[in-house]
Image (tube, coloured by chain):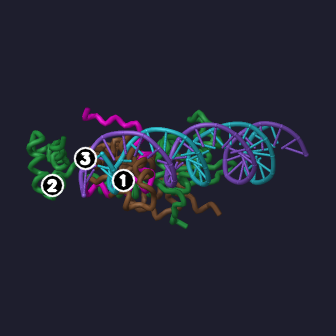
Chain colours: A brown, B green, C cyan, D purple
Amino acid sequence: MSDASPKHDVFQAVADPTRRQLLSLLSDREMPVTVLSGHFPMSRTAVSKHLRILSDAGLVKERKVGRETRYRLQPEPLLELKRWLSYYERFWDNKLMALKHFVEQDTSVASTAVRGSQAEPFSLVAASREEESDRG
Amino acid sequence: MSDASPKHDVFQAVADPTRRQLLSLLSDREMPVTVLSGHFPMSRTAVSKHLRILSDAGLVKERKVGRETRYRLQPEPLLELKRWLSYYERFWDNKLMALKHFVEQDTSVASTAVRGSQAEPFSLVAASREEESDRG
DNA sequence: TTGACGTGAAACCAAAAGGTTTCGTATAAT
DNA sequence: ATTATACGAAACCTTTTGGTTTCACGTCAA
């Protein structure tokens, strides 16, 4: 099975700082549990459980070597995150998208936006979302 | 304050499916709470709490209009996620990185890897993580 | 063989998360 | 003025999460 069907959500797996640090450590090289847990102010068992969650999400893969279990990074599931993120990228670096939003706004909103900002081409993103500042 | 100092972590904010869907809805246009909550099988108050979390993470911004509170997307904090993710991109689309890992392994490990795998150029990543099976 | 090491599973616990209902209050509509 | 709407805050409940300690078991070392 080269599948790695994730039982745990990658979003949730990555939400925990400890687990992110684990991924970071493992990005360098594979490591057994005890070595990993040495980097954290918690019990080995706790780290082991984090690893389990990462494993369920397909983000690490374990492999027995003698009496130790070595974990290594399996970055592929992060592609889901990347794909999700890519949808929102347009909102900060796609000027055409900003323009689309701009023209789709109802007129009063748009005009408020133009009034409220510098109205330069590159402030379209800001403009299309702007019009606060009338809140006190 | 144009700062948006996040009291809630963006990773955690985005970990919940409901909140991701909220962001998705808001990416189109700003919306008041009641309209948003119409899209979910839960109470308005629950949705309101999710919005609070998104707001704390700086991912949405609210604005009172009459008796309603309109929320809109504020995508900038997602850049933190993007930046985090970019570190791992090298592991799935940078062949040189795979090579780096390959040459960093100790020699016996590497030779075992070559024996143990198909030794194609594109299996370098897999190869660099190979090695055991000489036990038992 | 005996003992130390490396680990996961289990039982347990406190705190956080996600949800509900109820309530107060501001605004809009009649 | 009264009623309906939109909302957040509060109190409360249940489930999940992140952690602990204890235990059993396989493996390596003497």
- Across and down, in percent, residue A133 comes to 58, 62
Q: Amino acid at mark 2?
A: Leu
Q: Is residue B107 magenta?
A: no
- Kindly identify which residue carries mark 3: A66
Dot 3 falls on which chain? A
Location of the N terminus of chain B by quadrant is bottom right
Q: Is residue B29 above or below residue B2?
A: above
- Kindly identify which residue carries mark 1: A95
Viewer-proximal residue among A62 and D4: A62
Whole-angstrom CA distance, mark 1 to mark 3, is: 56 Å
Stretch in magenta: A1-29
Residue at 41% in and 54% down? A44
- Across and down, in percent, residue A88 comes to 40, 48
In terms of secondary structure, where does tag 3 sit? loop
- Horizontal arrangement in the rendering, residue B65 relative to residue B96 (left or right): right
Residue at 26% in and 57% down? A28
Viewer-proximal residue among B112 and A110: B112
Q: Amino acid at mark 1?
A: Lys
Location of the C terminus of chain B by quadrant is top left
Tell me if label 2 and label 1 are in contact, CB under 8 Å. no
- Residue B45, located in which quarter of the rendered image? top right
Q: Residues within 10 Å of mark 2 (few under 14, many from 20)?
A: few
Q: Nearer the viewer, mark 3 or mark 2?
A: 3
- Kindly identify which residue carries mark 2: B96
